[in-house]
Image: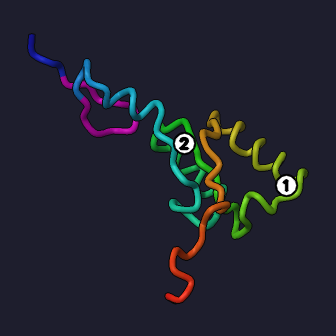
Amino acid sequence: MARKKIRPPQGGTLWEGTSSAMILERLGVLTDEVSERFEEALDWIQAQGLKHVELSVIDGVNFAELSDEVAQEVRRKVEARGLFVSALASPLFKCKLDPSRE
């Protein structure tokens, strides 16, 4: 049986019956890789028809350093666009493997 092409809401072409459609449903995008401005990144992600965001740096501040109040505002902005936080990209183990190398 031949597979049928489908057009997802954000454009492009997927093949019906493949995992491509599922990937777009589950794909999380690091907001600070889209834009340094958090709300601009959220708007772009929403416009692409994606559903999940990954948080690392919010308007120049690592999410681990956000106050509770700012973290609640971040959540409100994400949810207001119908998006979900799929991951927190922690800098916990970010280090130089060889300290002698700069």
What amino acid is labelled 2 in the image? Answer: Gln
Circle 1 sits in a helix, a strand or a loop, which is it?
A: helix
- Residue at x 76%, y 49% (from the top left corner): 74
- Residue at x 78%, y 42% (from the top left corner): 76
The magenta span reads 5-14
- Left/right placement of residue 61 relative to residue 102 reads right
Circle 2 sits in a helix, a strand or a loop, which is it?
A: helix
- Residue at x 62%, y 37% (from the top left corner): 83
Quarter occupied by residue 41: bottom right
Helix, strand or loop for the magenta stretch, by majority: loop
The disc at residue 70 is 1
What x and y, as percent, mark residue 51?
A: 54, 35
What x and y, as percent, mark residue 84?
A: 63, 36
What amino acid is labelled 1 in the image? Answer: Val
Of the pair 20 and 64, the residue shown nearer to us: 64
Taking 99 as reference, is 38 above or below it? above
Taking 96 as reference, is 31 above or below it? above
Residue 20 falls inside the magenta stretch = no
Labels 1, 2: front one: 1
Q: Which residue is mark 2?
A: 46
> Which badge, 1 or 2, comes first in the chain's sequence?
2
